[in-house]
Image (cartoon, grey):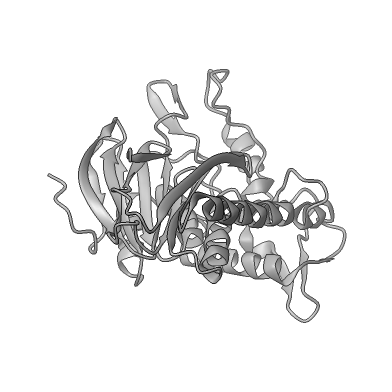
Amino acid sequence: MKTLIALACSFCCLLSFGQSRQTDVTVKKTLKLMGTRFEITVVAPNEEIGYINIDEAVSEIERIEKIISSWNKDSETSLVNKNAGIKPVKVSRELFNLIERSIKISEITDGAFDITYASMDEIWRFDGTMDKVPSEESIRKSVSKVGYKKIQLDHDNQTVFLPEKGMCIGFGAIGKGYAADRAKDLLVSKDVKGGIINASGDLTTWGTKVTGEKWLVGIANPLSKDKVFSWLPIIESSVATSGNYEKYIILDGEKYSHIIDPRTGYPTRGINSVSIFAKQAELCDAMATAVFIMGRDVGLHMINQIDGLEAVVIDAENKVHKSSGIMFDTN
C-alpha cells in the first residue's frame, strides 16, 4: 500500500502503513470537515466495518464543530461572542472545560496561545495586497480587546462572559486537535484496533498497523517535503505542526509570517515551522502555535520543562532544532 503523505503547513509528516495481512484491512477516507481536510484511517476486520467506523468518527467531528465553530451563528461559541459586553452565557460542560484548558495553556505560554486572538482587527493581509507595514497605532488598536485574562468563567453556573464589546473567542489553534482526540476516543471505545485521525496535518494515532508494526511519522524539510531525514515511531501519540512556508508577505525586504502574536499584533519571525509531539492532539495543536510565536529558544526551553512534550523547530535559515527527547541526528 502506498505511503500516506500528511502535509502540515510548511512541514510534512509521512506515514508508513506497510502491508496488510488477511485478518484485518486498512480503510481510509478523505473529506472536508471544520473547513479543512480530514483523513481518517482505521484498522478493521473488513472494509464495511471500517467505513462504518469512519462515519461514526465523522459524526463526532461534526458534533464538535457545531459547538466550537465561530462561523456557525447558532453555535455555543457564537452565542458567547454575540453577548460580549452584554451578559454571561451558559454553555455545555464540554465547551466550558475546553475554554478552561485553553486558559491554562495561555498561562503556561505567557499568552502566546490565546483564544481571544479572534478579537484582533485584521490589519495584516497576506493576499498580496499589502504594500507597507501597518502603523504602530493601528497595530496597538488591533489587539486592544485581546487578553485571555479578561475571560470570566463562573463554575457554579457554568457560564462564560466576555466583558468588552467586540471581544471574541475562537478555537482555530486548538479545535482541530480537540476534534481529532474526541474522534479517536470514540473509535477506541468501540474497540477499533488502530488508526489515525489526520486533521490537515494535526495527527493522532492509536494501536498499530495491520502488520503489528508501529505507525511512523517522517520528519521532512519544509523546503523539500519529499525528503525524509528521520522516521519517528509513534504509539498512542499525536503530532501537530504550525508553519509559514506557504503564507507570508515580504515588505521592505523583511519576511512576515501569517501567524500573529496576539500579545503584540505583530507577525512572528525567525521560524519556518514547529512540530509538537504529545499524547493529545489538542495540546500539540495549541503548543505548535505557541512555540512558533514564542520563538526557537524560549519555545524549546519551555517544551523541555514539560513532561510528555517534544518539539522539532525549523528556523528561518532552514536549520533543524529539537527538544531534548527527540532522538535523531539534525546534521
Could you tell me which residue is drawn at 53 percent across and 46 percent down?
Answer: 264
25 is higher (above) or lower (below) than 307:
above
What is the x, y in percent for residue 296?
32, 50
Q: Can you name the residue that lies furthest to the right here? A: 86
Q: Quadrant of residue 121?
A: top right
The foreground one among 110 and 58 is 58
Q: How many badges with numbers are in the image?
A: 0
What is the x, y in percent for residue 235?
34, 64
Q: Can you name the residue that lies furthest to the front here? A: 22
Q: Is residue 169 visible?
A: no
Q: Is residue 235 visible?
A: yes
Could you tell me which residue is drawn at 68 percent across and 51 percent down?
Answer: 62
154 is higher (above) or lower (below) than 228:
below
Q: Is residue 200 left or right of residue 274?
A: right
Placement of the C terminus among the 4 image quadrants: top left
The foreground one among 27 and 103 is 27
The foreground one among 312 and 104 is 312
What is the x, y in percent for residue 108?
47, 67
What is the x, y in percent for residue 305?
33, 70
Could you tell me which residue is drawn at 38 percent across and 64 percent down?
Answer: 207
Could you tell me which residue is drawn at 77 percent across and 74 percent down?
Answer: 158
